[in-house]
Every structure is written in structure tokens, then in C-alpha cells.
Image (cartoon, rainbow, N blue to C red):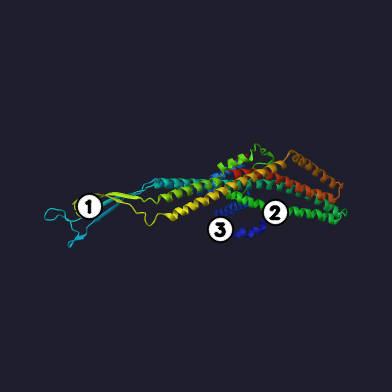
Amino acid sequence: MFCKYYHIIKLIKKYFSLPLLLLSLLISTADVLFAQKTNNIDTLSMSLPQAEKRFLDSNFLLLAGHYNVDAQQALIEQAKVWDNPTLNLDKVIAAHGQFWPTGKNPDGTYNGQYFIQVQQLIKTAGKRGKLINMATSNAKLSELQLQDVIRNLRYQLRTNYYNILQQIEQKKIYESQQIQLKKLLTGMEAQLNAGNIAQKDYLRIQALQISLDQDMTELNKQMEDNQNDFKTILQIRENVFVKPAENFNKMAPISNIVSNEILFDTGKIHNPYFQLQQIQTLYQQQNLSYQKSLRVPDVTIGPNFDKNSNFAPNYVGLGISVPLPVLNTNKGNIKSAEYSVKQQQAFTSNAETELKNNISNAYNKLLLTLKQNNSIQKEFYEKYQLMYDHVLQSYQQKQINLLEFLDFFNDYTDSQVRHLQQQLNLQLSKEELNYQTGIDILK
């Protein structure tokens, strides 16, 4: 190795000083260390509460939703503000052959004219209060939209979390099986070379190993997809692998499941999507009331002062302006608002039916999953693990043939994967019920 770089070092010494050489070596070493660190993927262990806290603190979609809520709250304050008064000024600039006549006439009167008027728009029929109510409903809609975004992202977060947990456990099963097959193949290769076993038996075990490797590759791809979604929700940009800190076996059992009717009543109160439909109905009703109020004309009122352009030299008057509702009585907008109310009422009724069916569906699936996860099955999987160890030992001692071993090996792998899937389904069923009700009714 030294000889390989000897000539390069001589050239460096010839053209560069020793300090510069040392600096170059230090920089090169730092680059190598940085590259190694960049290529290595660190593991970040995170519990579900920790993940949810980071999600609530750093997700950009939630930040945008909070800004929208603040914007709608500001519009409530804007709706409460009165319209600005209007100032009208009018002054003569040319009259009787004179430009900009000012001063006094020979008789002492003022030569010139000007007019001043201040007007204030007064909304009638409670329009201002109706606009405040509509702005308040809009702000409530933005809050519920944010809650619905949180609900959907939290459900996605938990789904990814439990999927990653299941995939890590499944990967452990595959890795354990790969170790056993590798040991078995090593021993069989020696027996094959000695002529004690047929090549077809060795190839069948090798095919089993290749199949297991392919399953492992597909599992790693799925895990990458879940990691990508999970880290996006958490706004993690580092090259890390987020590992769930929990374990299926250590999770608290699901209990205190209330009736379907109570769940439905809870969903009507806490499900943001259903509440959105209700507030939308209220908003459309408020809009209809506002459109009807527009039939009543607003009044513009204000004092005015006129100098030298009336029967009195200094005229003070009061002006009132009212549009006559003759040609436009806002019938089209009122009719449109009435149809919008009916449309939204239909949406709300459909949302209520959808909510009831979704909660009932999630409730029934949870009961079925709980029924499947019983103590008898737990005992079965424990015994099955012990039997697997015995079968592996029996095959190595040639007490069972290859076909019996292959059948049991495949069945055991499938049963372990199914067991993990069953544990995953239990957690996903719980989260689906929480998602539909809009609250963590099951911990």
C-alpha cells in the first residue's frame, strides 16, 4: 500500500510545503469521515407519544392550518367595524368671467362659494350583526378543518407507526429463518460433497433460502415506504431510521368498549368532519338571512354646509339618502341561498348516515379482531415455537424427511407472520374506531 502512494507523496513534497501537506491530509481525512457518517443510517427510537408531540410541534400542514384559523379570527374583528364616513368638498373655481373668485364684494359680502358634506352609511335590518355571525361561523369552519387535518394525519401517523413495528418484528422472523437455513445449507453442502445426500435436496433448501431472501427484499421496500411517510409527517429530514419504542406484546389490552349507540353519540360531538357539515348548514342559513336583509335598503345620512350657493349665505342642512328597492329586490340571491341551505342539509344528513355506518363498521371489526386474539391462540403460538425447535432438530438428526421439514418450515413462517398481522390488525382496528369517533375513546 505504501509503495502505491510513494511517488505521489514525493511529488507533493516537491511542489508543496510540509504545512500545506498536513492541511491537505487533514481535509482529506475529514472528508472521508464525513462521507462515512453520511452513508451510515442512524436509528432513532421513538415512542408513539413522542412521535405525536413532534408531529403537533413541527408539521407544516398544521402550521398552515393555524395561520388560516388566525386569518379567519381577524375577519370577525373586521366585520364588527363600522363603515368609514364620507367627506364631500365642492368649491367654485370659475364664475362671472373670473377664475378662482375669492375675497369680498363691494357690499362686503363674500365673493365665492364652497360646499362641505359628511355622510355616514347606516346598515339596516341587522346586516352588520348578520355579517359578524357569518364571519364567526367561517372561523369555526377553519378550526374544524384544522381539527380534521390533525385527525387524518394522526391516523396516518399511528398507522405507519404500527406498520413499521409489525415489519420490524416480521424482519426478525425472516432473519432468524435465514440463519437457520444458512446453518442447514452449510451442513448439507458438506454432506453433498461427501455424496451422502442428493443434489435435489440441497437445491430445494437453497430455493427456500432464495424465496426467503425475496420476501425480505419486498418487506424492506414496504418498510422504506412507511418510513418515508412517517418521517414526512414528523418533518424528519435526516438520514435516520425511526424505530418504534413499543412492542406488541407489551401493549395494554383493549378494554372498556362501550356500546355502538354511545360511540355514535360521541362521534356526533367529536368527529370534525360531521361537525363541519353542521356548521356549513348554519352558515348557509345565516347567509340566507343576510340575503333577505339586503331587500331592506341602507340609509346614508350626514350634515352639510353650503356657503353662498343657497337662499341663505351660510346654509346648514341634513342629507338623507335611501335607494329605492324597485328594480332590484335581491330575489335571485335569496333563491340561490335557499337552495344552498337545502343542499347543505342533504350533505349533513348523508354525513350523519356515513358517520353511523363507519362507526358501526369499525366497532364490528374491532369485536371480530378481539375475538380472534384470545388466550387459546396465544398458547398455541407458544407451543408452536417449541415444536419448531424440535422439528429443526429432528431433521438435522434425520428423524423426519425433507418434505416434512419443508412443509413445517413454511407453515411455521406463515403462522408467525399471520400472528404479527393479527396483532397489527388489533391496533389498527382500535385506531380506526378512534378515528371515526374523532376522539381517543380507546387507549
Q: Earlier in the sequence, mark 2 or mark 1?
A: 2
Q: Nearer the viewer, mark 3 or mark 2?
A: 2
Q: Secondary structure at mark 3?
A: loop
- Are discs 2 and 1 less than 8 Å apart at CB? no
How far across and how far down the image is residue 423, in percent? 69, 44
How packed mark 2 is, by other alpha carbons closer than 10 Å (few <14, some 14-19, many 20 or more), is few
Count of marks overlaid on the render: 3
Question: For the residues marked 3 and 2, what is the alpha-carbon distance in whole angstroms?
Answer: 53 Å
Q: Which residue is mark 1?
A: 306
In what element is the residue under mark 1?
strand
> Do the residues bearing badges 3 and 2 touch, measured as CB atoms within 8 Å?
no
Q: Amino acid at mark 1?
A: Asp
The residue type indicated by label 2 comes to Glu
**Quadrant including the N terminus:** bottom right
Alpha carbon distance from label 2 to label 1: 89 Å
- The answer to whether 324 is drawn above or below residue 381 in the figure is below
Question: Mark number for residue 16?
Answer: 3
Residue for badge 2: 218
Q: Secondary structure at mark 2?
A: helix
Residue 56 in the image: x percent, y percent?
55, 44
**Residue pushed farthest front?**
326
On screen, residue 120 versus residue 228, left or right, reads left
